């Protein structure tokens, strides 16, 4: 007599490995992301990236084309919850953090990655924007007077016309 039995096989995807990323860049310059930032991730051809939260004090910008001699970066702001394919999106294009003007300090955002439809869970990207000594701001000084007479300048004429965004003392 024949007997039959059902065999059920459940294949579980290897969990997605996503590590925190730490990046640093100078004030007023974009901080780019690239393939090197993804080298410690375990992902597949169908992996997706989801932006869970956006960084403060700047914008996360994405351009579907990588910058090069024939293409200048033209990123558009990403939105919270936005998803993109890792291989044909993020790794083929270019992701950058653009700090707010004159911002320096630390910011972060959360993202997650999927592999075979399984999401990694949120991981942080920590960004440090280092300060840069900005040039002082100079304003015109206007004085009027009669011909062949001295025109007087005082210290306040200059101190009111010059300022420094970094708060440095000007002398």
Image (cartoon, rainbow, N blue to C red):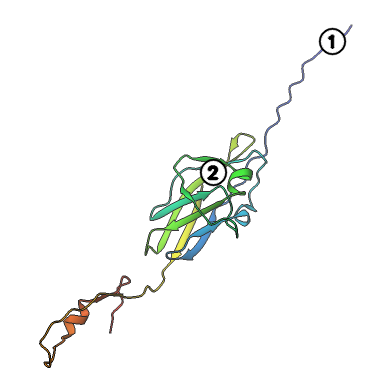
Instruction: State the residue at coordinates (15%, 86%).
Output: 154
137 and 149: which one is in front?
149
Instruction: State the residue at coordinates (14%, 88%).
Output: 151
Q: Which residue reaches farthest top?
A: 1
Instruction: State the residue at coordinates (38%, 58%).
Output: 100
Residue 113 x, y percent position in the rendering? 57, 42
107 and 143: which one is in front?
143
Instruction: State the residue at coordinates (25%, 74%).
Output: 139
Numbered disc 1: secondary structure = loop
Q: Quadrant of residue 67?
A: bottom right
Question: Which residue is label 2 attached to?
Answer: 112
Residue 102 x, y percent position in the rendering? 37, 65
Q: Quadrant of the C terminus?
A: bottom left
- 118 left or right of 136? right
Residue 81 x, y percent position in the rendering? 47, 39
Label of residue 163 in the image = none
Up the image or down, 53 lies above or below 157; here it is above
Residue 140 x, y percent position in the rendering? 23, 76
Disc 2 crowd rating (10 Å Cα; few below 14, some 14-19, many 20+) is many
Up the image or down, 110 lies above or below 150; here it is above
31 and 76: which one is in front?
76
Q: Which residue reaches farthest right?
A: 1
Numbered disc 2: secondary structure = strand
Q: Quadrant of the N terminus?
A: top right
Label of residue 3 in the image = 1
52 and 65: which one is in front?
65
Separation of marks 1 and 2 at Cα, in angstroms: 47 Å
């Amino acid at each position: 007599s024949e007997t039959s039995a059902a065999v059920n096989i459940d294949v579980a995807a290897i969990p997605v490995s996503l590590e925190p990323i730490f990046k640093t860049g100078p004030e007023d310059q974009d901080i780019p992301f690239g393939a090197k930032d993804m080298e410690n991730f375990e992902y597949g051809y169908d992996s997706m990236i989801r932006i869970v939260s956006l960084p403060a004090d700047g914008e996360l910008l994405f351009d579907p084309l990588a910058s090069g001699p024939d293409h200048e970066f033209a990123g558009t702001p990403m939105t919270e919850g936005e998803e993109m394919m890792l291989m044909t999106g993020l790794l083929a294009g270019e992701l950058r953090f653009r700090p707010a003007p004159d911002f320096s300090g630390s910011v972060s955002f959360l993202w997650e990655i999927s592999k075979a439809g399984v999401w990694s869970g949120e991981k942080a990207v920590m960004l440090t924007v280092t300060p840069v000594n900005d040039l002082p701001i100079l304003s015109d000084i206007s004085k009027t007077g009669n011909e062949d007479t001295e025109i007087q300048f005082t210290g306040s004429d200059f101190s009111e016309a010059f300022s420094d965004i970094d708060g440095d003392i000007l002398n």
